[in-house]
Amino acid sequence: FREKQSEGIARAQKAGVAIGRPTRKQDKRFHKVRDMYLAQEVTGQEAARLLGVAPSTFYRWLRQGGGNKKNARGGPTQQ
């Protein structure tokens, strides 16, 4: 069973089929909430709650191009 499954997955990947859970798109309000976060008006937890996403999603959005104010709060950088 696993062998057939692996072969099917390999064929799908070769054909360019996306495997796994789709990523969540940034909320339209992200930039406004990001600015509030950078101005230290809200915490990361509060910002995530305002957007209805997990804190890890909010922080990932910041890292993935949350704008040119990236890491303005003085947190650790990841490269």
Image: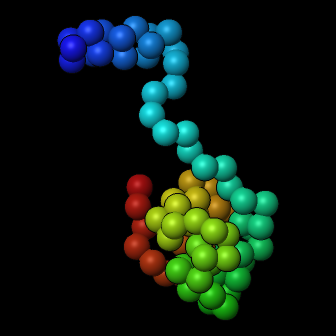
Q: Position of residue 55 (x, y in %)?
A: 50, 70
Whether residue 1 sits left or right of residue 16 in the image: it is left
Q: Residue at x 41, y 61 (%)?
A: 78
Q: Is residue 22 above or below residue 48?
A: above
Q: In the image as oriented, which residue stretches furthest toward the bottom?
A: 41
Q: Residue at x 67, y 87 (%)?
A: 39
Q: Is residue 42 above or below residue 13?
A: below
Q: In the image as oriented, which residue stretches furthest toward the front?
A: 1
In which quadrant of the rendered image does the C terminus lie? bottom left
Nearest the eye: 63 or 51: 51
Q: Position of residue 20 (x, y in %)?
A: 45, 34
Whether residue 5 sits left or right of residue 40 in the image: it is left
* Quarter location, residue 32: bottom right
Nearest the eye: 1 or 10: 1
Q: Position of residue 65 (x, y in %)?
A: 62, 56
Which scheme is used to colour this image of the protein? rainbow
Regarding residue 63, the answer to whether it shows in the image is: no
Regarding residue 67, the answer to whether it shows in the image is: yes
Query: What is the total number of numbered labels drawn onto the structure image?
Result: 0
Q: Is residue 6 above or below residue 28?
A: above
In which quadrant of the rendered image does the N terminus lie? top left
Nearest the eye: 36 or 23: 23
Q: Position of residue 14 (x, y in %)?
A: 44, 10
Q: Residue at x 36, y 16 (%)?
A: 9
